[in-house]
Amino acid sequence: MAVYTHVDPADLAALVARYDIGSVLSCKGIAEGVENSNFLLETTAGRFILTLYEKRVSAGDLPFFVDLLDHLANSGSPVPAMIRDRSGVAVQQISGRSACIIQFLSGISLTHPNAAQCEAAGAALGAMHRSLAGYDGARDNSMGHRHWRGVADATGNLDAVRPGLQAIVDAELAFVEAHWPADLPAHVIHADLFPDNVLMLGDRVTGLIDFYFAATDFRAYDLVITHAAWTFSADGSTCDPALAGALMRGYAREITLTEAERAALPTLARGAALRFLLTRAHDWVHTPADALVTRKDPSPFLARLLRYRAADAASLFAAA
Protein backbone atom coordinates (compact mmCIF):
# COMPACT_ATOMS: atom_id res chain seq x y z
CA MET A 1 0.00 0.00 0.00
CA ALA A 2 1.10 3.57 -0.68
CA VAL A 3 -0.09 6.89 -2.03
CA TYR A 4 1.07 8.07 -5.43
CA THR A 5 -2.16 9.68 -6.67
CA HIS A 6 -4.30 12.03 -4.61
CA VAL A 7 -8.09 12.19 -4.83
CA ASP A 8 -10.15 15.36 -5.11
CA PRO A 9 -12.83 15.44 -2.36
CA ALA A 10 -15.60 16.29 -4.83
CA ASP A 11 -14.61 13.40 -7.08
CA LEU A 12 -14.55 11.07 -4.09
CA ALA A 13 -18.02 12.16 -2.99
CA ALA A 14 -19.34 11.55 -6.50
CA LEU A 15 -17.78 8.10 -6.57
CA VAL A 16 -19.17 7.07 -3.19
CA ALA A 17 -22.62 8.34 -4.20
CA ARG A 18 -22.82 5.50 -6.75
CA TYR A 19 -22.78 2.96 -3.91
CA ASP A 20 -25.06 2.06 -1.03
CA ILE A 21 -22.32 2.73 1.51
CA GLY A 22 -23.42 6.07 2.97
CA SER A 23 -21.59 9.36 2.54
CA VAL A 24 -17.93 10.24 3.09
CA LEU A 25 -16.71 11.11 6.58
CA SER A 26 -12.96 10.88 5.98
CA CYS A 27 -10.39 9.46 3.59
CA LYS A 28 -6.80 9.03 4.77
CA GLY A 29 -3.80 7.77 2.82
CA ILE A 30 -2.12 4.55 3.91
CA ALA A 31 1.67 4.81 3.67
CA GLU A 32 2.68 1.16 3.51
CA GLY A 33 4.05 -0.94 0.65
CA VAL A 34 4.86 0.29 -2.82
CA GLU A 35 2.29 -0.94 -5.34
CA ASN A 36 -0.95 1.10 -5.37
CA SER A 37 -2.47 4.22 -3.85
CA ASN A 38 -4.56 3.16 -0.85
CA PHE A 39 -6.87 5.07 1.44
CA LEU A 40 -8.83 4.24 4.56
CA LEU A 41 -12.30 5.44 3.61
CA GLU A 42 -14.80 6.09 6.40
CA THR A 43 -18.43 6.66 5.55
CA THR A 44 -21.65 6.89 7.51
CA ALA A 45 -22.04 3.14 6.84
CA GLY A 46 -18.60 2.03 8.07
CA ARG A 47 -15.00 1.58 6.94
CA PHE A 48 -13.73 0.60 3.51
CA ILE A 49 -10.47 0.60 1.57
CA LEU A 50 -10.24 2.74 -1.57
CA THR A 51 -7.52 1.49 -3.92
CA LEU A 52 -6.25 3.33 -6.99
CA TYR A 53 -4.24 1.05 -9.26
CA GLU A 54 -0.83 2.30 -10.27
CA LYS A 55 1.82 1.16 -12.73
CA ARG A 56 2.23 -2.49 -11.68
CA VAL A 57 -1.45 -3.39 -11.88
CA SER A 58 -2.94 -3.41 -15.34
CA ALA A 59 -6.55 -2.29 -15.67
CA GLY A 60 -7.05 -5.31 -17.90
CA ASP A 61 -6.21 -7.61 -14.98
CA LEU A 62 -8.77 -6.14 -12.60
CA PRO A 63 -11.69 -8.36 -13.72
CA PHE A 64 -9.47 -11.35 -12.91
CA PHE A 65 -8.85 -10.07 -9.37
CA VAL A 66 -12.55 -9.38 -8.83
CA ASP A 67 -13.45 -12.88 -10.01
CA LEU A 68 -10.67 -14.45 -7.93
CA LEU A 69 -11.84 -12.79 -4.72
CA ASP A 70 -15.43 -13.79 -5.47
CA HIS A 71 -14.31 -17.40 -5.88
CA LEU A 72 -12.31 -17.39 -2.65
CA ALA A 73 -15.05 -15.69 -0.65
CA ASN A 74 -17.61 -18.19 -1.92
CA SER A 75 -15.33 -21.05 -0.87
CA GLY A 76 -14.97 -19.71 2.66
CA SER A 77 -11.57 -18.02 2.52
CA PRO A 78 -11.35 -14.84 4.66
CA VAL A 79 -10.81 -12.38 1.80
CA PRO A 80 -12.21 -8.85 1.33
CA ALA A 81 -14.96 -8.38 -1.23
CA MET A 82 -14.63 -5.75 -3.92
CA ILE A 83 -17.81 -3.73 -3.39
CA ARG A 84 -20.08 -3.24 -6.40
CA ASP A 85 -22.03 -0.06 -7.04
CA ARG A 86 -25.79 0.02 -7.66
CA SER A 87 -25.21 -1.00 -11.27
CA GLY A 88 -23.12 -4.02 -10.27
CA VAL A 89 -19.81 -2.43 -11.29
CA ALA A 90 -16.73 -3.12 -9.13
CA VAL A 91 -14.00 -1.35 -11.15
CA GLN A 92 -14.34 2.45 -11.31
CA GLN A 93 -12.33 5.43 -12.54
CA ILE A 94 -11.14 8.34 -10.37
CA SER A 95 -8.21 10.76 -10.60
CA GLY A 96 -7.21 9.19 -13.90
CA ARG A 97 -6.82 5.73 -12.32
CA SER A 98 -8.82 2.54 -12.21
CA ALA A 99 -10.10 2.09 -8.67
CA CYS A 100 -12.10 -0.21 -6.40
CA ILE A 101 -13.82 0.21 -3.06
CA ILE A 102 -13.01 -2.85 -0.99
CA GLN A 103 -14.49 -4.36 2.15
CA PHE A 104 -12.62 -3.49 5.35
CA LEU A 105 -11.69 -6.54 7.44
CA SER A 106 -10.95 -6.45 11.16
CA GLY A 107 -7.60 -7.67 12.34
CA ILE A 108 -3.99 -6.69 12.86
CA SER A 109 -1.03 -7.19 10.55
CA LEU A 110 1.76 -8.66 12.61
CA THR A 111 5.34 -7.47 12.87
CA HIS A 112 6.73 -10.36 14.92
CA PRO A 113 4.49 -13.43 14.55
CA ASN A 114 4.81 -16.23 17.08
CA ALA A 115 4.76 -19.96 16.34
CA ALA A 116 0.99 -20.31 16.78
CA GLN A 117 0.42 -17.43 14.37
CA CYS A 118 2.82 -18.93 11.84
CA GLU A 119 0.96 -22.23 12.08
CA ALA A 120 -2.35 -20.43 11.50
CA ALA A 121 -0.90 -18.61 8.49
CA GLY A 122 0.40 -21.87 7.03
CA ALA A 123 -3.01 -23.50 7.46
CA ALA A 124 -4.75 -20.49 5.87
CA LEU A 125 -2.37 -20.68 2.91
CA GLY A 126 -3.02 -24.40 2.52
CA ALA A 127 -6.79 -23.95 2.74
CA MET A 128 -6.60 -21.21 0.12
CA HIS A 129 -4.58 -23.52 -2.15
CA ARG A 130 -7.22 -26.24 -1.79
CA SER A 131 -9.85 -23.72 -2.87
CA LEU A 132 -7.76 -22.57 -5.82
CA ALA A 133 -6.94 -26.07 -7.08
CA GLY A 134 -10.40 -26.15 -8.67
CA TYR A 135 -10.41 -22.56 -9.88
CA ASP A 136 -10.34 -22.25 -13.67
CA GLY A 137 -9.09 -18.66 -13.81
CA ALA A 138 -5.50 -18.05 -14.86
CA ARG A 139 -3.03 -15.17 -15.11
CA ASP A 140 0.56 -15.04 -16.28
CA ASN A 141 2.98 -14.40 -13.43
CA SER A 142 4.55 -11.12 -14.52
CA MET A 143 6.89 -11.39 -11.52
CA GLY A 144 7.70 -15.05 -12.15
CA HIS A 145 11.16 -16.48 -12.74
CA ARG A 146 11.17 -15.78 -16.49
CA HIS A 147 10.92 -12.05 -15.75
CA TRP A 148 13.63 -11.64 -13.09
CA ARG A 149 16.44 -10.90 -15.51
CA GLY A 150 14.35 -8.10 -16.95
CA VAL A 151 13.78 -6.62 -13.48
CA ALA A 152 17.54 -6.75 -12.83
CA ASP A 153 18.30 -5.03 -16.13
CA ALA A 154 15.65 -2.35 -15.48
CA THR A 155 17.13 -1.57 -12.07
CA GLY A 156 20.49 -0.55 -13.50
CA ASN A 157 23.79 -0.99 -11.71
CA LEU A 158 22.96 -3.17 -8.71
CA ASP A 159 26.31 -2.36 -7.12
CA ALA A 160 24.90 1.14 -6.55
CA VAL A 161 22.35 -0.46 -4.22
CA ARG A 162 24.94 -2.60 -2.43
CA PRO A 163 28.59 -3.22 -3.43
CA GLY A 164 29.01 -6.69 -4.93
CA LEU A 165 25.28 -7.22 -5.49
CA GLN A 166 25.54 -7.35 -9.29
CA ALA A 167 27.78 -10.44 -9.26
CA ILE A 168 25.54 -12.24 -6.75
CA VAL A 169 22.43 -11.53 -8.81
CA ASP A 170 24.09 -12.58 -12.05
CA ALA A 171 25.08 -15.90 -10.49
CA GLU A 172 21.61 -16.51 -9.08
CA LEU A 173 19.90 -15.69 -12.35
CA ALA A 174 22.11 -18.26 -14.06
CA PHE A 175 21.28 -20.81 -11.35
CA VAL A 176 17.53 -20.23 -11.61
CA GLU A 177 17.57 -20.49 -15.38
CA ALA A 178 19.45 -23.80 -15.18
CA HIS A 179 17.66 -25.44 -12.23
CA TRP A 180 14.09 -24.14 -12.01
CA PRO A 181 11.79 -27.17 -11.67
CA ALA A 182 9.05 -28.18 -14.09
CA ASP A 183 5.70 -29.94 -13.80
CA LEU A 184 5.00 -29.26 -10.13
CA PRO A 185 1.36 -28.80 -9.05
CA ALA A 186 0.28 -25.33 -10.15
CA HIS A 187 -2.75 -23.06 -10.03
CA VAL A 188 -3.40 -19.44 -9.12
CA ILE A 189 -1.37 -18.46 -6.04
CA HIS A 190 -1.22 -15.36 -3.83
CA ALA A 191 2.53 -14.82 -4.45
CA ASP A 192 2.90 -12.10 -1.76
CA LEU A 193 1.61 -13.52 1.53
CA PHE A 194 3.78 -11.45 3.86
CA PRO A 195 2.62 -10.78 7.43
CA ASP A 196 1.31 -7.36 6.37
CA ASN A 197 -1.04 -9.14 3.95
CA VAL A 198 -2.55 -11.33 6.67
CA LEU A 199 -4.90 -9.93 9.30
CA MET A 200 -5.10 -11.72 12.63
CA LEU A 201 -6.91 -11.47 15.94
CA GLY A 202 -4.81 -13.35 18.44
CA ASP A 203 -3.80 -16.60 16.76
CA ARG A 204 -6.74 -16.59 14.33
CA VAL A 205 -6.50 -15.45 10.70
CA THR A 206 -9.28 -12.96 9.93
CA GLY A 207 -8.17 -11.74 6.52
CA LEU A 208 -5.97 -12.52 3.52
CA ILE A 209 -5.52 -9.32 1.54
CA ASP A 210 -3.67 -7.68 -1.38
CA PHE A 211 -3.96 -10.27 -4.15
CA TYR A 212 -2.48 -8.02 -6.85
CA PHE A 213 0.46 -10.33 -7.52
CA ALA A 214 -1.83 -13.36 -7.73
CA ALA A 215 -0.99 -15.43 -10.80
CA THR A 216 -0.61 -18.97 -12.03
CA ASP A 217 2.51 -20.64 -10.63
CA PHE A 218 3.65 -23.56 -8.47
CA ARG A 219 1.81 -23.85 -5.16
CA ALA A 220 5.14 -24.80 -3.53
CA TYR A 221 6.57 -21.49 -4.73
CA ASP A 222 3.77 -19.71 -2.85
CA LEU A 223 4.70 -21.72 0.24
CA VAL A 224 8.38 -20.72 0.11
CA ILE A 225 7.46 -17.06 -0.37
CA THR A 226 5.44 -17.32 2.84
CA HIS A 227 8.31 -19.18 4.53
CA ALA A 228 10.74 -16.40 3.60
CA ALA A 229 8.33 -13.73 4.81
CA TRP A 230 7.27 -15.25 8.15
CA THR A 231 10.14 -17.24 9.64
CA PHE A 232 13.26 -15.05 9.43
CA SER A 233 14.75 -12.40 11.67
CA ALA A 234 14.21 -8.80 10.60
CA ASP A 235 17.64 -8.61 8.99
CA GLY A 236 17.08 -11.91 7.16
CA SER A 237 20.16 -13.60 8.58
CA THR A 238 18.45 -16.23 10.74
CA CYS A 239 15.56 -18.59 10.09
CA ASP A 240 13.79 -19.48 13.36
CA PRO A 241 13.24 -23.27 13.35
CA ALA A 242 10.23 -23.03 15.66
CA LEU A 243 8.48 -20.55 13.37
CA ALA A 244 9.45 -22.46 10.23
CA GLY A 245 8.32 -25.78 11.68
CA ALA A 246 5.00 -24.29 12.77
CA LEU A 247 4.35 -22.77 9.34
CA MET A 248 5.10 -26.07 7.59
CA ARG A 249 2.98 -27.99 10.11
CA GLY A 250 0.01 -25.70 9.53
CA TYR A 251 0.32 -26.03 5.77
CA ALA A 252 0.60 -29.82 6.04
CA ARG A 253 -2.76 -29.94 7.82
CA GLU A 254 -4.34 -28.79 4.56
CA ILE A 255 -1.95 -29.89 1.78
CA THR A 256 0.41 -32.86 1.48
CA LEU A 257 3.34 -31.86 -0.70
CA THR A 258 4.54 -34.30 -3.31
CA GLU A 259 8.04 -35.76 -3.15
CA ALA A 260 9.04 -33.60 -6.14
CA GLU A 261 7.73 -30.47 -4.40
CA ARG A 262 9.71 -31.23 -1.25
CA ALA A 263 12.89 -31.78 -3.26
CA ALA A 264 12.37 -28.47 -5.06
CA LEU A 265 11.80 -26.30 -1.95
CA PRO A 266 15.40 -25.03 -1.54
CA THR A 267 15.62 -24.02 -5.22
CA LEU A 268 12.19 -22.39 -5.13
CA ALA A 269 13.17 -20.55 -1.95
CA ARG A 270 16.33 -19.20 -3.57
CA GLY A 271 14.11 -17.95 -6.38
CA ALA A 272 11.66 -16.35 -3.95
CA ALA A 273 14.47 -14.52 -2.14
CA LEU A 274 15.91 -13.38 -5.46
CA ARG A 275 12.53 -12.13 -6.67
CA PHE A 276 12.01 -9.86 -3.63
CA LEU A 277 15.65 -8.79 -3.58
CA LEU A 278 15.29 -7.64 -7.19
CA THR A 279 11.94 -5.87 -6.89
CA ARG A 280 12.97 -4.12 -3.68
CA ALA A 281 16.25 -3.04 -5.26
CA HIS A 282 14.31 -1.73 -8.27
CA ASP A 283 11.92 0.23 -6.03
CA TRP A 284 14.81 1.49 -3.92
CA VAL A 285 16.24 3.11 -7.04
CA HIS A 286 13.07 4.18 -8.83
CA THR A 287 10.44 5.12 -6.20
CA PRO A 288 9.57 8.84 -6.66
CA ALA A 289 11.05 11.05 -3.97
CA ASP A 290 7.69 12.76 -3.33
CA ALA A 291 5.64 9.54 -2.99
CA LEU A 292 3.98 8.90 0.38
CA VAL A 293 5.50 5.44 0.59
CA THR A 294 7.73 3.31 2.77
CA ARG A 295 10.56 1.92 0.65
CA LYS A 296 11.75 -1.54 1.68
CA ASP A 297 15.45 -2.27 2.11
CA PRO A 298 16.51 -5.13 -0.21
CA SER A 299 19.36 -6.26 2.09
CA PRO A 300 17.27 -8.65 4.26
CA PHE A 301 16.35 -10.62 1.16
CA LEU A 302 19.97 -10.85 0.15
CA ALA A 303 20.57 -12.40 3.58
CA ARG A 304 17.69 -14.84 3.04
CA LEU A 305 19.08 -15.76 -0.36
CA LEU A 306 22.47 -16.59 1.17
CA ARG A 307 20.78 -18.73 3.84
CA TYR A 308 18.74 -20.63 1.27
CA ARG A 309 21.94 -21.28 -0.70
CA ALA A 310 23.50 -23.13 2.25
CA ALA A 311 24.06 -26.89 2.09
CA ASP A 312 21.52 -27.53 4.88
CA ALA A 313 18.74 -25.40 3.34
CA ALA A 314 16.37 -28.39 3.04
CA SER A 315 16.31 -28.63 6.86
CA LEU A 316 14.56 -25.25 7.01
CA PHE A 317 11.38 -26.83 5.64
CA ALA A 318 10.91 -29.60 8.19
CA ALA A 319 7.55 -29.57 9.98
CA ALA A 320 8.11 -29.41 13.74
Image (spheres, grey):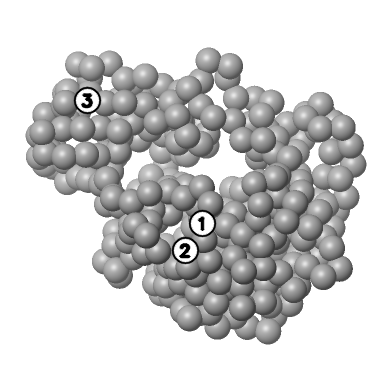
Residue 156 visible in this rendered orientation of the protein = yes
Please count the marks in the image. 3
Q: Which residue is mark 1?
A: 113
Above or below, comparing residue 82 to residue 248 in the picture: above
Residue 313 appears left or right of 275: right
State the residue at coordinates (73%, 40%).
299
Badges 1 and 2: C-beta atoms under 8 Å apart?
yes
Q: Which residue is mark 2?
A: 117
Residue 27 in the image: state x and y as whole percent. Answer: 26, 26
Residue 209 visible in this rendered orientation of the protein = no
Residue 119 in the image: state x and y as whole percent. Answer: 50, 69
Above or below, comparing residue 6 to residue 157 in the picture: above
Pair 1/3: label in front: 1
Image quarter of residue 265: bottom right
Mark 1 surroundings: few (<14), some (14-19) or many (≥20) residues within 10 A: some
Badges 1 and 3: C-beta atoms under 8 Å apart?
no
**Quadrant containing the N terminus in the rendered view:** top left
Q: Which residue is mark 3?
A: 26
Image quarter of residue 286: top right
**Quadrant containing the C terminus in the rendered view:** bottom right
Mark 2 surroundings: few (<14), some (14-19) or many (≥20) residues within 10 A: many
Circle 2: element type = helix
- C-alpha separation, residue under disc 3 versus residue under disc 2: 32 Å
